[in-house]
């Protein structure tokens, strides 16, 4: 995992969280790549992925070469459920990163409902260290849009962070990505895009 830093202007930068899914690709939330100040999508050369970042140190880094996102996604604050369900992006890196990636598991709705979910992200108020939350629960919803509700809290900067569970082989796998918080229920769950939504795009990106 690492920080996705986006240059938004002279001396200005925004951040989100991303996950390495193979040596040249990073999964994050699409809205992280939108330059709200200019109302435009960031140019790939303005996007920088820093893997394993912690207090100024890092394992590896690369600028982006390109990225893909849902053609139907638009940034319309406040983010509505229909748009939140399309809020994913796959970044192609300009350089290869020789670190172990985390696979995307295209789980079905019935398969993804579980506890023991782990999520880690770079909070805006603790931007130089990875904050880890463990033993969250997650359940799918289909109305008003296909999303995951999970009990991991969310703070600005953590958008794009992966929801992880341990697969049958003992390795971590991605079942969703955080995109927003929700106040629709008393527990104030967070919203995530299920991996089944972007699994096909990930497969296509990784096959190139």
Image: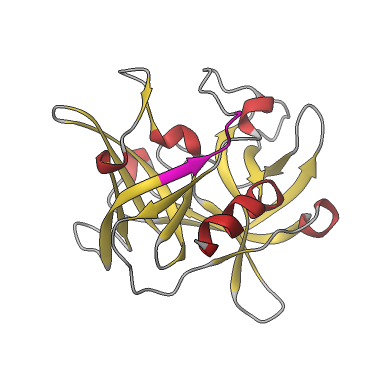
Taking the spot 81% from the left edge, 51% from the top edge, the residue there is 109
Please state if 177 lies on the left or on the right of 60 as rendered: right
Please state if 133 lies on the left or on the right of 198 as rendered: left
Quarter location, residue 123: top left
Residue at far left of view = 11
Q: How is the image coloured?
A: secondary structure
Where residue 169 appears, as percent x and y from the top left, is 67, 82
Quarter location, residue 88: top right
Where residue 174 appears, as percent x and y from the top left, is 60, 60
Res 183 visible: no
Depth check, front residue: 16 or 93: 93
Q: Which residues are magenta?
A: 67-72
* Vertical side of 67 occupied by 52: above or below: below
Where residue 175 appears, as percent x and y from the top left, is 65, 57
Taking the spot 58% from the left edge, 56% from the top edge, the residue there is 204
Please state if 38 lies on the left or on the right of 120 as rendered: left
Where residue 62 appears, as percent x and y from the top left, is 27, 57
How many numbered badges does the structure rendering display? Answer: 0
Depth check, front residue: 153 or 50: 50
Taking the spot 46% from the left edge, 57% from the top edge, the residue there is 19
Report if residue 69 lies within the magenta region: yes
* Vertical side of 188 occupied by 131: above or below: below
* Vertical side of 207 occupied by 99: above or below: below
Residue at far right of view = 110
Res 89 visible: yes
Taking the spot 38% from the left edge, 48% from the top edge, the residue there is 122
Which corner quadrant holds the N terminus?
Answer: bottom left
Report if residue 77 lies within the magenta region: no
Depth check, front residue: 189 or 33: 33
Please state if 28 lies on the left or on the right of 186 as rendered: left
Residue at far front of view = 208
């Amino acid at each position: 995992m690492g920080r996705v830093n986006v240059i938004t202007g002279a001396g200005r930068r925004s951040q989100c969280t991303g996950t390495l899914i193979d040596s040249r690709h990073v999964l994050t939330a699409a809205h992280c790549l939108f330059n709200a100040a200019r109302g435009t999508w960031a140019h790939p050369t303005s996007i920088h992925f820093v893997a394993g970042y912690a207090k100024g140190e890092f394992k590896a880094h690369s600028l982006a070469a390109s990225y893909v996102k849902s053609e139907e996604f638009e940034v319309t604050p406040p983010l509505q459920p229909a748009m939140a369900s399309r809020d994913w992006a796959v970044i192609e890196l300009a350089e290869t990163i020789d670190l172990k990636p985390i696979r995307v598991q295209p789980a079905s709705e019935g398969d993804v409902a579980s506890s023991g979910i782990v999520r880690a992200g770079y909070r805006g108020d603790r931007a130089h260290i990875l904050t880890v939350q463990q033993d969250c629960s997650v359940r799918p919803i289909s109305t008003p849009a296909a999303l995951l509700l999970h009990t991991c809290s969310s703070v600005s900067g953590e958008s794009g962070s992966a929801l992880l569970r341990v697969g049958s082989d003992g390795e971590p796998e991605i079942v969703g990505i955080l995109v927003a918080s929700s106040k629709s229920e008393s527990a104030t769950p967070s919203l995530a895009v299920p991996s089944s939504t972007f699994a096909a795009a990930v497969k296509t990106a990784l096959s190139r």
